[in-house]
Image: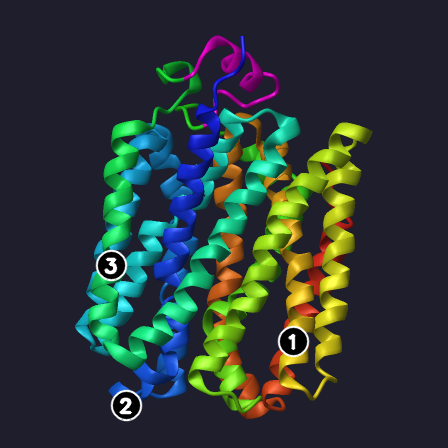
């Protein structure tokens, strides 16, 4: 009997949710300078507004994962998608306080996406295919950002940014309706899964993921590897968020680019991140099948790629030609993107049936880093040497992350 492909539709649903979430989340960054000028804001105001997403996003990771264990991934993700769509529409109110509140609500709503997604993949894919699934999931996060950059620039030039955010809310509502109708929490519960697919899925999957079980908090919190994974995620998320916050402004102010050109060039590192996620997952799973070593296929691969990323970003510091500098930075982001599936597969192995909760803990730490970086950028510009200091700090972040991976034990 040939296995059915229901698990791939599950993965496609997760990927589309990731793309939609990052689409609305990052639709603000290309419009930052326009919104700032339209509302008479300062860069500090913009930094606080952008970072308002990440504090509740970070702090709600664990509660969102625990709620999903009680509700099941099906209804939890539906609820989260409806909430972030409402928050997106609220951004159209066009007043700093309301926009900041909408960003914060969006952070609460999207907090569960990654931990619930990791738990779903742990339950629907065996160990030898988990990095590939995670690579697609993380890659489609950047797909949303890629689409958001030029589309936002087009809206700014033609229709205005307030109506843009109302329209941006619609796809998430449509997705929530489909997912509520089609998805089931466990492979055995889905009518489209045949016996052959069920047997393939259960070879090494964490089928108990996202069901109500006692969480071994003491064991988790005493694990050095968990703390190292939290720390590396803090730095990696702080590095990635540069593209979702200040990169377009960096290209406009430090490299002298127009709004439209900066929006298009912002997509290059994000495209590289997508390519890295897909190919990194395939390579990591191939190494796992060939060697049987999680140390080599997950930890070793992540450490080497992060070192390459840091070297490329720091190298772009010395390049005067703007497009070439962006291409070098994009090569670094390819390496960083290829680490994402290594990280997610490590969490699935490390967390087992509690992969979603472990992911929530590490992702919480990552988003504390993401919340700090947009606030630090204006300070670095004003007091530490301008945009050159920002780029240097950006590269150093990935160097530290590589060192942390060297001590992880899977």
Residue sitting nearer the eye, 72 or 320: 320
Residues under labels 2 and 3: Cα distance? Answer: 22 Å
Q: Which mark is residue 40?
A: 2
> Of helix, strand and loop, which one carries label 3?
helix
Q: Local crowd at mark 2 within 10 Å, few (<14), some, or many (≥20)?
A: few
Answer whether residue 342 is visible to the viewer in this image. Answer: no
In the image, residue 121 lies at what x, y percent?
50, 32
Q: What's the colour scheme?
A: rainbow
Range drawn in magenta: 193-209
The residue indicated by pointer 3 is 87
Residues under labels 1 and 3: Cα distance? Answer: 32 Å
Residue at left offset 51%, top offset 66%: 241
> Of helix, strand and loop, which one carries label 2?
loop
> Of helix, strand and loop, which one carries label 1?
helix
The residue indicated by pointer 1 is 393
Tell me, yes or no, whether the highlighted magenta stretch contains residue 270: no
- Relative horizontal placement of residue 19, taking residue 256 as reference (left or right): left
């Amino acid at each position: 009997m040939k296995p059915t492909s229901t698990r791939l539709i599950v993965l496609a649903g997760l990927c589309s949710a990731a793309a939609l979430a990052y689409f609305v989340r990052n639709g603000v960054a290309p419009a930052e300078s326009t919104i700032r000028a339209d509302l008479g804001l300062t860069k500090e105001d913009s930094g606080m507004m952008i970072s308002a997403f990440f504090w509740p996003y970070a702090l709600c990771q664990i509660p969102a994962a625990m709620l999903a264990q009680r509700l099941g991934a099906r209804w939890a993700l539906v609820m989260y998608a409806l909430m972030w769509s409402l928050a997106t529409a609220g951004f159209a109110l066009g007043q700093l306080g309301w926009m900041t509140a909408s960003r914060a609500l969006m952070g609460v709503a999207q907090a569960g996406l990654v931990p619930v997604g990791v738990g779903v993949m742990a339950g629907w894919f065996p160990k030898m295919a988990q990095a590939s699934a995670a690579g697609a999931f993380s890659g489609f996060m950047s797909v949303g950002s890629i689409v958001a950059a030029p589309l936002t620039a087009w809206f700014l030039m033609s229709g205005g940014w307030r109506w843009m955010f109302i329209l941006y809310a619609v796809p998430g509502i449509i997705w929530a309706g489909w997912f509520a109708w089609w998805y089931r929490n466990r492979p055995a519960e889905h009518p489209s899964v045949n016996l052959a697919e069920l047997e393939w899925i259960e070879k090494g999957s964490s089928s108990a993921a996202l069901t109500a079980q006692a969480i071994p908090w003491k064991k988790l919190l005493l694990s050095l590897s968990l703390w190292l994974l939290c720390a590396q995620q803090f730095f990696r998320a702080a590095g990635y968020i540069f593209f979702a916050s200040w990169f377009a402004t960096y290209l406009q102010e430090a490299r002298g680019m127009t709004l439209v050109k900066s929006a298009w060039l912002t997509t290059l590192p994000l495209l590289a991140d997508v390519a890295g996620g897909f190919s990194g997952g395939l390579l990591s799973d191939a190494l796992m099948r060939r060697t049987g070593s999680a140390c080599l296929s997950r930890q070793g691969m992540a450490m080497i790629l992060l070192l390459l990323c840091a070297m490329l970003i720091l190298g772009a510091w010395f390049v005067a030609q703007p497009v070439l500098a962006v291409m070098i930075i994009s090569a670094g982001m390819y390496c960083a993107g290829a680490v994402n599936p290594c990280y997610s597969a490590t969490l699935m192995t490390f967390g087992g049936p509690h992969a979603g909760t472990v992911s929530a803990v590490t992702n919480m730490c990552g988003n504390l880093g993401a919340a700090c970086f947009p606030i630090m950028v204006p300070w670095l510009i004003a007091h530490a040497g301008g945009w050159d200091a920002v780029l240097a700090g950006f590269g150093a972040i990935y160097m530290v992350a590589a060192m942390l991976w060297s001590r992880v034990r899977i």
